[in-house]
Image (cartoon, rainbow, N blue to C red):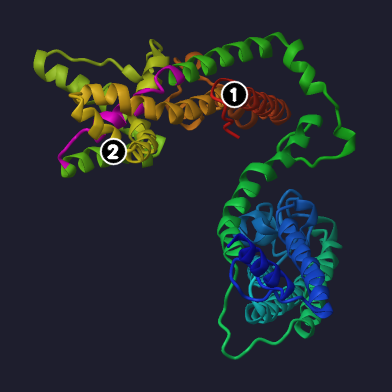
Amino acid sequence: MMCKMADLNAASDNFGLSRRSGRPDRVKSMPEKVADKVYWVLRLAVFVNVILLFFSNFNPARITGMTNKNVSLFSCGMSYSSITGNFGRAFRQGWVQESTFKSLNVCCLLIIIAVVICIAGACMSLGNNKMKKTGLIISVFGAAAELGCMGWLYALYNQVCDSADACGKWDKIQPIYSSMNYVYMAVAIVMIVCAFVNFFLVPAAEKTDKYEMEPKFQLFLMFLPIISLAFVFSYLPLYGWRYAFFDYKAGETLSMDKFVGIKWFTQLFQNAATKKDIVTVLKNTLAMSGLGIITSWIPMIFAIFLSEIKNTKFRRIVQTCTTIPNFISWVLVYAIALAIFSTDGFINTMLASITGEPYTTNYLMSNSHMWLKMLAWGLWKGVGWSAIIYIAAISGIDQGLYEAATVDGAGRFAKMWFITIPELIPTYCVLLLMSIANILSNGMEQYLVFSNAVNRESIQVLDLYVYNLGINSGLIPLSTVIGMVKSVVSVILLFAANSVSKAIRGESIV
């Protein structure tokens, strides 16, 4: 029997049959191989096009020197005020026409839409021939629209020049035609050329074909938005670390004459006031994060007891009521706290009505037990949401274990102690180690809304300290340095926690 199976496998290999599907593996022709390489050029051009949108140095929409140099094309398309933030006097004096910059805002928005269309065309290149053909048409349309917008930008630049000639304010308006316009045009032309070349290289699809794509590419495209968001909000901001090496102030431009090297890094250890602040901030951060780690078992216990409720309707009500606070912003949480604990809040009003004497204690202004207060608010807001992962883990426990325990005479608490908790320990360990790795990142919003002049010294954590340095004090380079150090330490803690997990449990978390 084994010999026959071996003969069949050899025969299938000789005839080019796929062992998974039983269908013949079609060998790609030379034009198709060339088309695959051209597709890589097309995808690279689309990727470059996307990157250009988010960097201010590659912004072709800056057609006048009055526009902020730190604004990207994406910001110009999404926000009209980002273009005209410095144009109040120019509009009032009639130096430039406001309609020109409204058109500029629309033009930038159309460029963004054109890039999105090109992205869609590039994604369709992962499908079958019918989908590829349609994707090529879409890519040509998006690239052509981008080229048209580049021409529109040139026309708007000419309008600005005409306005400068009319009012004689060339030195004020400073019309600029950015060379980045040619870069965008070159990228669009590359996409059009690649699309036209592949339109003739890709074999024609059968009329009966449907739009299809391999499952692995479908899963990749489903995951692509997550990758994009992680890049935009997690990795792209790292470009701002360059401020740590310059003597920069808000509104200024970066230039090498302001380069100071590691001056701000050394100030962390040389300035006595800064060292004192950092020690206090680290004490608050580690204390509040430590309290969170110590009480990290509470969501697990809550999930265990919640799963033991037999009344399904009541269990759902409890789970819903405890999960809703997670979706309430900290601003609204503070509004609730203000209504309860302020001078004329619920507690003082109730005490005054009971005793007949006025009570004017402002509990929110108190500095006592601030760490425990923040812990209590954090638990109220997050315990229901944090319990969801444990509830999911409990639903995956083998029910045969509970049935066997029932046969042996185990009660409800015995089952929880000897079955449920041990089965949840691996999940708890992973979350615990992740919490240890993020011990320096315990959020900012909660402490920002609850902070005041009285409790500031006890409530200011590292993230809030960085925010106050950069926004309130204007020390952007120093706040950037502290943020960089925090990020590096967090990465080190993550790898350390991963090593501990691998050594103790034999499993890594990353």
Determine whether the residue tagged by mark 1 lies in a helix, strand or loop: helix
**Visible residue check, residue 158:** no
* Residue occupying image coordinates x 57% and y 16%: 281
Q: What's the residue type where badge 1 is placed?
A: Ala
Q: Nearer the viewer, residue 213 or 55?
A: 213
Determine whether the residue tagged by mark 2 lies in a helix, strand or loop: helix
Q: What's the residue type where badge 2 is placed?
A: Gln
Q: Position of residue 356 (x, y in %)?
A: 10, 14
Q: Position of residue 215 (x, y in %)?
A: 57, 64
* Residue occupying image coordinates x 66% and y 86%: 205
Residue 339 position (above or below residue 136): above
- Quarter placement of the C terminus: top right
Residue 467 position (above or below residue 71): above
Residue labelled with disc 2: 399
Question: In whole angstroms, how far apart are the C-alphas of marks 1 and 2?
Answer: 32 Å
Furthest toward the bottom, the residue is: 207
Earlier residue among tags 1 and 2: 2
Q: Is residue 302 magenta?
A: yes
Q: Main secondary structure of the magenta part?
A: helix
Determine crowd level at label 1: few under 14, some 14-19, many 20+ residues with C-alpha closer than 10 A.
many
Which numbered tag is attached to residue 404? none
- Quarter placement of the N terminus: bottom right
Q: Is residue 438 magenta?
A: no
Left or right? Give the position of 490 relative to 412.
Answer: right
Highlighted magenta segment, given as a residue range: 293-311
Left or right? Give the position of 361 relative to 236.
Answer: left
Total numbered labels placed on residues in the image: 2
Q: Nearer the viewer, residue 383 or 106?
A: 383
Q: Nearer the viewer, residue 123 or 181?
A: 123
Residue 203 position (above or below residue 345): below
Q: Position of residue 72 (x, y in %)?
A: 71, 54
Residue labelled with disc 1: 497
